[in-house]
Image (cartoon, rainbow, N blue to C red):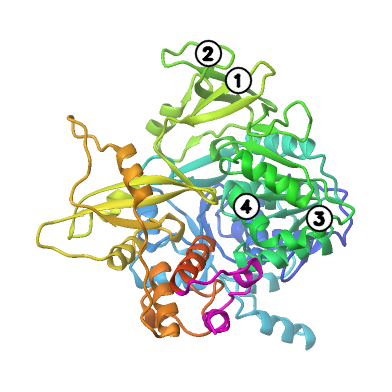
């Protein structure tokens, strides 16, 4: 992984708002690794939570080069979740954004003494000192301050055994499980992906997944570094960034696009007018990952942009992918998950016997890329890793050509926009609110997001709570992407004679329930009230310059709901161009005023 590679010195590693070459990345990796080794953090666990790609990549790779074990957290992870993790898992060091560390300290989260604070406050000082030809004392506890340290002495050989990284997955339990991936599994997996995608140093991967997510980590930073190619990250994915992302495909000569089905659907919906950007003379194919890809999205995306789209299936427990539908013709069946590559797959009946052709059962996988287990959780590990086989919890069938098709799920999990969400976790948080008597969270199908979580709440007699109060309560305990997308109040939950909630009945009732919105005459006030409700914010938190980039909760799902709400409220129709240019509240107000004249 960290061996000398024949990558030209000027080859870009990262292209984004700011870029980073492979040669400069290598220098930064060595500085970070030296800092961690000198602090005796090699072979130790380091919590890593960093927003900025330009800092994240060298800090992650430097951590791994030092032999430390990065535990990767999504930047949207709540304070309570961080506290819970630190209570149940021993951590030796922290690398995180300075404002996150300050918040954790203010909330009394017990942090280890070894910390690297990530910020940009030192950047100007570094540049000034460089221009003046002097070296300032190195601040080894600050990024990018630690880069001003003297060049490190030669480092010990890089590890190729033991834990490489840990990512967290919600799965079907309330507490996220840490998927512990060891070096041999990671290296085997990177080799498989690189060969299957036919990557070379000239390849350019536009990966739209979060870098703390397995598909962003492995098929992004680690794959680009190991293969000596380029990772393109023009902007965090959102509807208002779609145009800049599609322009980057042409401008940066992207060869592979890696994205969740939700992003693919939104790119088609709001970026079809820029389809010619895929005709850059280099593009090979797009890769769908992290969530089920519907046949409709698969076909429409391919036809809209005139590109090949391949589908992958895998779990954090398999690194990323285990099965691939394409790019070869034999496995490229629309609607399927294709065939295993460098893995064995089988389908088991309830009695443990192997299912026959076209017979549904649980999909089980075996291969060199399987996780070692769940961090500090032998019971959960034993439940899914049995006799060398990973029991995925997904139902599948295999056709006569050896192609696999997912038919359902055994485990209770909601997949929304590529994130695995735990209904149990959402229920548990809502039950902590004093006004809540009962709650059941179910999945509703959604053409763009796959599924969305909807919480059905029964309040205690004589007590009151509204939608916004409960969502604000949830936000104190859950990450931003884990919040229920709707809360529905009901007098009672439908149950079987044994007391089990009948989720199918709830889902049917929710699918029939209308959403009510009404205007009050003041357009600007109505727009701000609608936004506050959808983004789970007090109205006072929204300003004229509030937008997706600076407003918590204003993600792509909320943006679509905002569009639907505006269309319903003001009886207008917003074009794709209108939608992608709703970059601020002021811009949205002006748009509605123009359309309602």
Please name whichever residue, 591 or 347, is drawn nearer the observer in this view of the structure.
Answer: 591
**Residue that carries the numbered disc 2 in the rendered image:** 355
Mark 2 to mark 3 CA distance (whole Å): 42 Å
Q: Is residue 243 left or right of residue 386?
A: right
Q: Which residue is mark 1?
A: 398
The mark lying in front, picked from 2 and 3, is 3
Judge whether 201 appears above or below 236 on screen: above
Measured in 3D between alpha carbons, the distance from the residue under mark 4 to the one under mark 3, in whole angstroms, is: 16 Å
Q: Secondary structure at mark 1?
A: strand
- Asked whether 547 or 25 is in front, the reply is 547
Q: Earlier in the sequence, mark 4 or mark 2?
A: 4
- Does the residue at mark 2 contact the one at mark 1 (Cβ under 8 Å)? yes
Which residue appears at 34% of the width and 53% of the height?
513
- Specify start and end residues of the magenta stretch as a single range: 570-597
Query: Mark 3 or mark 2, which is nearer the start of the sequence?
Result: 3
Residue 265's disc number: 4
Query: Considering only order in the chain, which callout, 3 or 1, is on the residue closer to the N terminus?
Result: 3
Residue 565 horizontal/vertical position (percent): 45, 68
Q: Secondary structure at mark 4?
A: helix
Residue 453 shown left or right of residue 145 in the figure: left
Residue position for label 3: 278
Residue 514 position in % (x across, y down)? 36, 57
């Amino acid at each position: 992984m960290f061996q000398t590679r024949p990558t030209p010195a000027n080859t870009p590693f990262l292209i984004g708002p700011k870029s980073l070459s492979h040669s400069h990345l290598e220098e930064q990796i060595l500085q970070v690794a030296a800092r961690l080794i000198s602090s005796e953090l090699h072979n130790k666990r380091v919590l890593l939570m960093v927003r900025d790609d330009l800092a994240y990549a060298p800090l992650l790779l430097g951590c791994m080069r030092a032999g430390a074990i990065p535990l990767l957290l999504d930047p949207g992870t709540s304070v309570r979740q961080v506290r819970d993790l630190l209570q149940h898992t021993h951590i030796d060091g922290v690398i995180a954004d300075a404002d996150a560390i300050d918040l954790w300290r203010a909330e009394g989260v017990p942090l280890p003494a070894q910390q690297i604070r990530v910020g940009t406050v030192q950047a100007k000082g570094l540049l000034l000192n460089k221009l003046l030809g002097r070296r300032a004392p190195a601040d080894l506890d600050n990024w990018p301050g630690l880069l001003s340290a003297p060049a490190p002495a030669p480092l010990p050989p890089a590890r190729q055994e033991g834990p490489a990284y840990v990512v967290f997955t919600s799965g079907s339990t309330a507490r996220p499980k840490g998927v512990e991936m060891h070096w041999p599994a990671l290296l085997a997996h990177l080799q498989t992906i690189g060969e299957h995608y036919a990557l070379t140093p000239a390849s350019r991967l536009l990966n739209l997944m979060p870098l703390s997510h397995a598909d962003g980590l492995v098929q992004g930073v680690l794959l680009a570094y190991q293969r000596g190619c380029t990772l393109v990250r023009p902007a965090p994915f959102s509807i208002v960034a779609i145009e800049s992302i599609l322009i980057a495909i042409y401008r940066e000569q992207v060869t592979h696009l890696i994205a969740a089905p939700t992003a693919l659907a939104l790119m088609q919906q709001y970026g079809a007018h820029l389809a010619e950007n895929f005709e850059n003379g280099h593009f090979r194919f797009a890769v769908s990952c992290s969530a089920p890809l519907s046949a409709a999205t698969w076909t429409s995306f391919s036809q809209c942009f005139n590109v090949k789209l391949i589908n992958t299936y895998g779990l954090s427990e398999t690194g990323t992918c285990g099965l691939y539908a394409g790019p070869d013709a034999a496995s490229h069946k629309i609607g399927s998950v294709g065939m295993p590559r460098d893995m064995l797959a089988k389908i088991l009946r309830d009695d443990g016997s192997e299912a026959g052709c076209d017979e549904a059962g649980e999909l089980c996988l075996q291969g060199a890329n399987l996780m070692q287990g769940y961090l500090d959780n032998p019971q959960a590990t034993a439940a899914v890793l049995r006799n060398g086989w990973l029991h995925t919890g997904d139902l599948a069938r295999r056709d006569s050509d050896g192609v696999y098709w997912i038919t359902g799920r055994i485990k209770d999990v909601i997949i929304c926009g590529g994130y695995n969400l735990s209904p149990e976790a959402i229920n548990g948080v809502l039950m902590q609110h004093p006004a809540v008597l009962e709650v059941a969270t179910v999945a509703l199908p959604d053409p763009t997001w796959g599924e969305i979580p909807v919480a059905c709440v029964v309040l205690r007699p004589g007590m009151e709570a509204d939608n916004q109060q409960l969502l604000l309560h949830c936000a104190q305990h859950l990450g931003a992407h884990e919040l229920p997308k709707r809360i529905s109040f009901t007098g009672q939950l439908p149950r079987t004679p044994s007391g089990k909630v009948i989720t199918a009945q709830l889902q049917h009732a929710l699918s029939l329930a209308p959403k009510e919105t009404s205007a009050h005459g003041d357009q600007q006030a109505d727009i701000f009230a609608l936004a506050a409700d959808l983004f789970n914010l007090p109205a006072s938190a929204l300003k004229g310059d509030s937008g997706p980039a600076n407003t918590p909760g204003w993600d792509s799902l909320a943006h679509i709901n905002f569009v639907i709400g505006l269309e319903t409220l003001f009886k207008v129709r917003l074009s794709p161009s209108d939608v992608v240019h709703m970059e601020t509240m002021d811009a949205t107000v002006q748009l509605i005023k123009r359309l309602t004249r």
